[in-house]
Image (cartoon, helix red, strand yellow):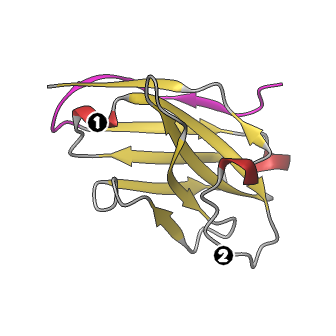
Amino acid sequence: QVQLVESGGGVVQAGGSLRLTCTAPSRIFGRSAMGWFRQAPGKEREFVAVITRSGSTTYYSDSVKGRFAISRDKDSNTAFLQMNSLKSDDTAVYYCAAKPTILSDNRHFSDSSDYAHWGQGTQVTVSS
């Protein structure tokens, strides 16, 4: 059962920007680290970014570091992925995921098997 809902994907030219959003039920969002993953055609799903439950710490894959920014808003139960300087290699389906944690847990959850809840994905296509 899909409990997370992503939006904001689309087609953008190389060098452009997109902002993805992920909305979750409060019972999930308020107890979870929130992550973004992506899967390109013919490739395995890969980690993109994660923000801890407290919002104090973020982690990024090397391929997006310095270009993408993850954030969260507890009032709207929404996580965001701001994507700048997009490249054709960023083309993929982007998935939001939630990993229930304790508030003080600031570990780097980059393995998809760590996550209990997933959205259905949103397509991002970067044209060159």
Q: Nearer the viewer, residue 31 or 37?
A: 37
Position of 51 with respect to 82 (left or right) is right
Location of residue 69 with respect to 117 vertically, above or below: below
Find disc 1 in the rendering and name its residue.
89
Q: State which quadrant residue 25 falls in.
A: top right
Residue, x 74% and y 54% (percent of image)?
114
Eye-nearest disc, 1 or 2: 1
Q: Is residue 76 visible?
A: no
Kindly identify the amino acid type of the residue bearing the numbered disc 1: Asp
Tell me the tag on residue 65: none
Q: Which residues are magenta?
A: 1-16
SS under mark 2: loop
Find disc 2 in the rendering and name its residue.
106
Circles 1 and 2: CB atoms closer than 8 Å: no
Q: Is residue 98 magenta?
A: no
Q: CA distance from mark 1 to mark 2?
A: 29 Å
Q: Nearer the viewer, residue 97 or 21?
A: 97
Kindly identify the amino acid type of the residue bearing the numbered disc 2: Asn
Residue, x 24% and y 40% (percent of image)?
86
Q: State which quadrant residue 89 falls in.
A: top left
